[in-house]
Image: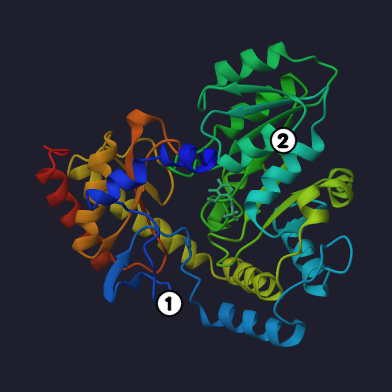
Amino acid sequence: MNLLREKMMKYDAPQKYKAEGIYPYFRVIESDQDTEVIINGKKVLMFGSNAYLGLTNHPKVKEAAIEATKKYGTGMAGSRFLNGTLDIHVELEKKLADFVHKEDALVFSTGFTVNEGVISCITGRDDYILWDERDHASIIEGERVSFSTKYKFRHNDMISLEKQLKRCDPTKVKLIVVDGVFSMEGDLANIPEIVRLAKKYNANIMVDEAHGIGVLGANYSGKGVCDHFGLLDEVDLIMGTFSKSLASIGGFVAGEYPVINYLRHNARPYIFSASITPAATAAASAALDILKSEPDRIKRLWDLTHYTLDQFKERGFEVGPTASPIIPLYIRDDKKTFTITKMLFEEGIFVNPVVPPAVSSNDTLIRFSLMATHTFEQIDYAVERIEKIFKEMEVLK
Ligand code: PMP
């Protein structure tokens, strides 16, 4: 008997949904990626992307990637630690550190490995990690790998966080880690209160700005949620990814020099994994330049976001406490969520179904996300179709 195969055969959820014709994953895109994409030869409106600024297809970003490939080649045959450091890596680290007002920064090959590598590296046996129950999987991964004591607190519940802080040894490191914008439901971490509690209990803070950079920040700065609250300087570590607003792949962490220097020599994905490709580095750098020089793009994203939220709310949709271009449309039923995703796809609308473990089982939802390049007409069409289908499926009265 093949034990491994027997064990894997018990995993029947995908087969079940495939048989019912509502399996929603791995849809293959055959075109460039903007607000319209081609899937199965058919044009669909993309409302499932994290490229909030719509820069994935920007000529300057593409050109930067092409030029970097021409100059440096296609890949890095080594980690940053050894033979994998280019001048453009160092330049981008400096640019990112300046952007989020920190002394130093490190660029990793993905955002996932930033959280995994950083959190596990800087917290040891005697230390504590305090994490929000809705934190991204990569934060949970970092926390799992760490030898520290881990305390989970209820989502954005500051009483729960304080209760957990009280349990910690006051003489040891206590790292509070939160998503700045929660990735599935679009709500913001309560950074002001987290900063207050961190001061009270002498804890440190790391904020994941994956969905904050390019979206939030004072005066459309795009510096993220911490800047939005005017508290960038109160947060010890900022992490971000290049896979969303920065139209590339990779991630970074920024903070004070001693912490970054320790990570530079000890973070395992930084030392033992090949460094980010020249093309990805140059694309992220070019996207960051555009982000900084074109605040109107961020303003446009917000105009679209407010408009869309108003449209959904007026029609009675349940959209939760989102404060970002991530708009959750709650369905609270896995099968209906998959069915509606398919029905919308047939109407030419791509959205993402979100089911456990990404959200709790009674919070399943359609994640509708906006890009600065969407048009109001595209939104009107999508809202109208979504309303029709939600009514048909009796999610909306
Ligand atoms: N943090 C958050 C909040 C995310 O949503 C993601 C990506 N979904 C990551 C980290 C990981 O980033 P990357 O895609 O660059 O690995």
* Mark 1 surroundings: few (<14), some (14-19) or many (≥20) residues within 10 A: few
Label total for image: 2
Q: Which structural element holds mark 1?
A: loop
User: Residue 77 vs residue 129: left or right?
Assistant: right
* Kind of residue at badge 2: Val
Q: Which mark is residue 146?
A: none
Q: Which structural element holds mark 2?
A: helix
x and y percentages locating residue 252 in the rendered image? 70, 55
Q: Nearer the viewer, residue 280 or 227?
A: 280
User: Residue 348 vs residue 108: left or right?
Assistant: left
Circle 1 residue: 32
x and y percentages locating residue 26 in the rendered image? 40, 59
* Residue 225 drawn above or below residue 279: above
* Residue 369 drawn above or below residue 151: below
What residue is shown at x 35% (from left), y 67% (from top)? 374
* Mark 2 surroundings: few (<14), some (14-19) or many (≥20) residues within 10 A: some
Of labels 1 and 2, earlier in sequence is 1
* Kind of residue at badge 1: Asp
The answer to whether the residues at label 1 and label 2 have Cβ atoms under 8 Å apart is no
Q: In the image, which is nearer the foreground, mark 1 or mark 2?
A: 2
Circle 2 residue: 145
Q: Nearer the viewer, residue 334 or 173?
A: 334
What residue is shown at x 26% (from left), y 35% (from top)? 333
Q: Quadrant of residue 391?
A: top left
Label 1, label 2: how far apart the Cα atoms are? 37 Å
